[in-house]
Image (cartoon, helix red, strand yellow):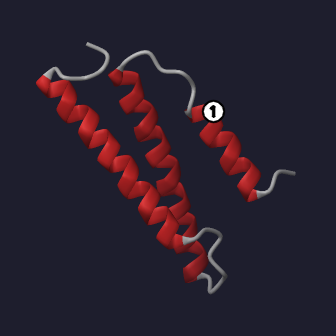
Amino acid sequence: MLSKKELDEKVVKLLKNDYKNEKTEITRLKNELEYEDYKIIKCAEYQLAGKELPYDIEELNQIRDGLREQINKLEEEKKKGTTLWN
C-alpha cells in the first residue's frame, strides 16, 4: 500500500502532464487545487476526531494560495490576450 506521501507524489505527477494551452493549464491547476482542498477536508475530519493532522496545514495553505494565484494570473492573461499560448 502506498504511503500518503507516495500517493500525493503520484497524483501531482499525473496532474503535471505536458499541457498545450492556457485552458488546459488552468484546468490542471484547478484539478490540483481540488486535490489540495481534499487534503484540507481530511485535516478537518482528523481534527474533529481528535486525531493528529495528516498534512501540514500551513504548507497546504501556501500551496493552495500559490495555485489560486497562478490560476488568477493565467485567467487574467487570457482575458487580456497576453498568454504565452497566443
12 over 64 or under it: above or below: above
Q: How many marks?
A: 1
Left or right for 50, reference 21: right
Q: Quadrant of residue 84?
A: top left
Quadrant of residue 76 within the rendered picture: top left
Image quarter where the C terminus lies is top left
Residue appearing at x 43%, y 62% in the figure: 62
Q: Is residue 64 above or below residue 42?
A: above
Q: Nearer the viewer, residue 13 or 54?
A: 13
As drawn, which residue projects farthest toward the right?
1
Question: Residue 20, percent across and down?
Answer: 44, 15
Please name the residue shown 46% across and 47% down the image: 34
73 in relation to 79, above or below: below
- Residue at x 20% of width, y 29% of height: 77
Q: In the image, residue 39 lies at what x, y percent? A: 55, 60
Extreme residue toward the bottom, this view? 50
Residue at image x 27%, y 33%? 74
Q: Is residue 45 left or right of residue 27?
A: right
Residue projecting furthest to the left: 80
Spot occupied by residue 24 in the image (x, y as percentages of width and height) = 40, 23
Tell me if 83 is positioned left or right of 8 in this view.
left
Q: Secondary structure at mark 1?
A: helix
Amino acid at pointer 1: Leu
Q: Nearer the viewer, residue 57 or 84?
A: 84
Residue 6 locus on image (x, y percent): 76, 50
**Where does label 1 land, which residue?**
14
10 Å crowding of disc 1: few (<14), some (14-19), many (20+): few
